[in-house]
Image (tube, rainbow, N blue to C red):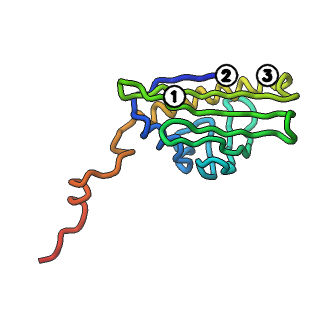
Amino acid sequence: MRVIESHIDAPPERVWAVLTDFPAFADWNPFVTSISGAAAPGARLEVRLCPPVGMAMTVKPKVTAAAAGRHFAWHGRLGLPRIFDGAHEFIIDAEASGGVTFVQKETFRGLLVPFLGRVLEHAHEGFELMNTALKERAEGDASLHAPPTPEVARSSSPSPRR
């Protein structure tokens, strides 16, 4: 099992919002450049991975967990069971400071694993890049992620005619 851990100075809700805003991945994520599907248990995703070295690939994992603000996980396989299975988890652990510890865990099993060392190392590097980009995105200007305040909403709406 490989684990990547980062501290993010943003509330769990914001980290979750960035992590599950799949259409925006192309704007900020250097490794997982697109995801289509729903962040809901049982849903099938289509995930485009572009490692820092090597060829891009598309995988179609199944969502195994989705708890808003806390946990998102998927499981995929190449061909038949026990050939190459991959489980990936994203854990958002709230801290007393108001930030989070963001953890990615990946576990690979199967007959091909011993032969894919370099490929899996490049994937690990890609997920490290993703953690850095997620941190930057979630810690960025809060106004980009927050709904408008009532004052802003009122001032931007047309004034009634008298």
Q: Nearer the viewer, mark 1 or mark 3?
A: 1
Quarter of the figure with residue 127: top right
The residue identified by callout 3 is: 117
Residue at (75% x, 31% y) in the render:
54
Q: Position of residue 32 (x, y in %)?
A: 62, 39
**Would you say the residues marked 1 and 3 are in contact, meaning their CB atoms lie under 8 Å apart?**
no
Residue at (24% x, 64% y) in the render:
157
Mark on residue 2?
2
Q: Residues within 10 Å of mark 1 (few under 14, many from 20)?
A: many
N-terminal-most mark, 2 or 3: 2
Q: Position of residue 76 (x, y in %)?
A: 75, 40
Mark on residue 102?
1
Residue at (45% x, 32% y) in the render:
136
Seen in the picture, residue 161 relative to 63 is either above or below; the reply is below
Q: Residues within 10 Å of mark 2 (few under 14, many from 20)?
A: few
Placement of the C terminus among the 4 image quadrants:
bottom left
- Residues under labels 1 and 3: Cα distance? 25 Å
Q: Amino acid at mark 2?
A: Arg
Residue at (62% x, 22% y) in the render:
3
